[in-house]
Image (tube, helix red, strand yellow):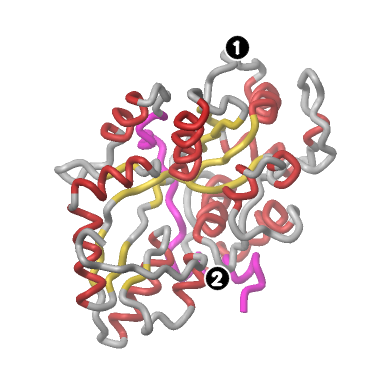
Amino acid sequence: MAHGIQVHITKAGSRAVAMGDVDQYDFVFPSGQPAALLIKEQRQAERKFAKVHKPFFSPIVFGTYREYAEALLTRLRGEPSSDDKKLYFSVDMAKLVDLMRAGTRWSDLDHEPSLDNGNQVLVQTPDVCSANSAATYLGLLAFVVNGQRPPVDETEALALADQVKPFLVGQGLPGDDMSMQYLAPEGRGLAPVAVFYEHQYLAHQIRHVRQNGRSDTNRVLIYPEAQLQTVPEYIALTPDGDRLGQLISNDPALKQRALELGFRVFEPDGSLSAGRLAEHLDSLGLPAPDSGVSDTETFLPPLPLLEKMIERVGGCR
């Protein structure tokens, strides 16, 4: 209320927002570019107000537990981690796909003590029909399976969707918010390895330090080596919504709040950097993840093809 704006929030998955009626809202804030593009194209086709703000960004990550990360990376790399305080790991997605394709179970992986989980090695996601993180993970899998390139036509896209579908539907009924399941006290049983956004994990660590005086070393992150940045797009649908978007993007106090929630904010020159986030984490005694911008980049399929793949995998209506 410091700026005289009262905000009421309706929570929904990014793709669910994009496929729904947004006329009753002043703004929408999808988590990634595919859903945002759907909304912008629809607004443009209907010649309706739409103004975009991009205040911060966050990579797609896999949240897991230390013993799962150690067992997985020991199998994929041949050597365990010797640092029991390390919070951030990376994984070769091609090797992970091979492991999942082979039907390997968590209990098959070497770890002492052994993992008490007979389920197949899979990364759990929310519903691909409604959540941007799941759709992004689908695109990442397709990119890896297709030899580090996105599909170029519908035939190729649908064939790839059929190949990666078992990795998403094999988890059973998807959850709504994987970060909440992963961060729950019983998270090991709910979501031992889950897809969500880096900022959700970092916000947990920031809270943990403030409440307990130390980091949560039981929970760790795994980053796909071919990084995939997700840039949430705040789309103002009315002039009032645009005013709020400008505040979120430019107000110093709100930028600081974004850092406290684990987001990477854009630098003054508009570049992607983790500099300010690293400084904030360091002030709390937390290690900072890498920049998240690697030499190898993952490219999602063009939106029309990604939509076809989502519908093929999820049976969306």
Query: Which quadrant of the figure contains the N terminus?
Result: bottom left
In terms of depth relative to the viewer, which is nearer, 155 or 102? 102
Which x, y percent locates residue 54? 27, 56
- Which amino acid type is marked by label 2? Lys
Query: At 60% across and 51% down in the image, what residue appears?
Result: 178
Query: At 27% across and 32% down in the image, what residue appears?
Result: 275
Which x, y percent locates residue 78? 67, 18
- Residue 306 in magenta stretch: yes
The residues colored magenta run 289-317
- Pointer 2: residues within 10 angstroms few (<14), some, or many (20+)? some
Direction from residue 121 to residue 201 in the image, left or right:
left
The residue indicated by pointer 2 is: 308
Direction from residue 24 to residue 204 in the image, left or right:
right
The residue indicated by pointer 1 is: 82
In terms of depth relative to the viewer, which is nearer, 221 or 123? 221
- Which amino acid type is marked by label 1? Ser
Which x, y percent locates residue 21? 44, 83
- Residue 153 in magenta stretch: no
Query: Which quadrant of the figure contains the C terminus?
Result: bottom right
The answer to whether residue 224 is seen in the rendering is yes
Numbered disc 2: secondary structure: helix
As displayed, is residue 75 above or below residue 194?
above
Query: At 56% across and 28% down in the image, what residue appears?
Result: 216
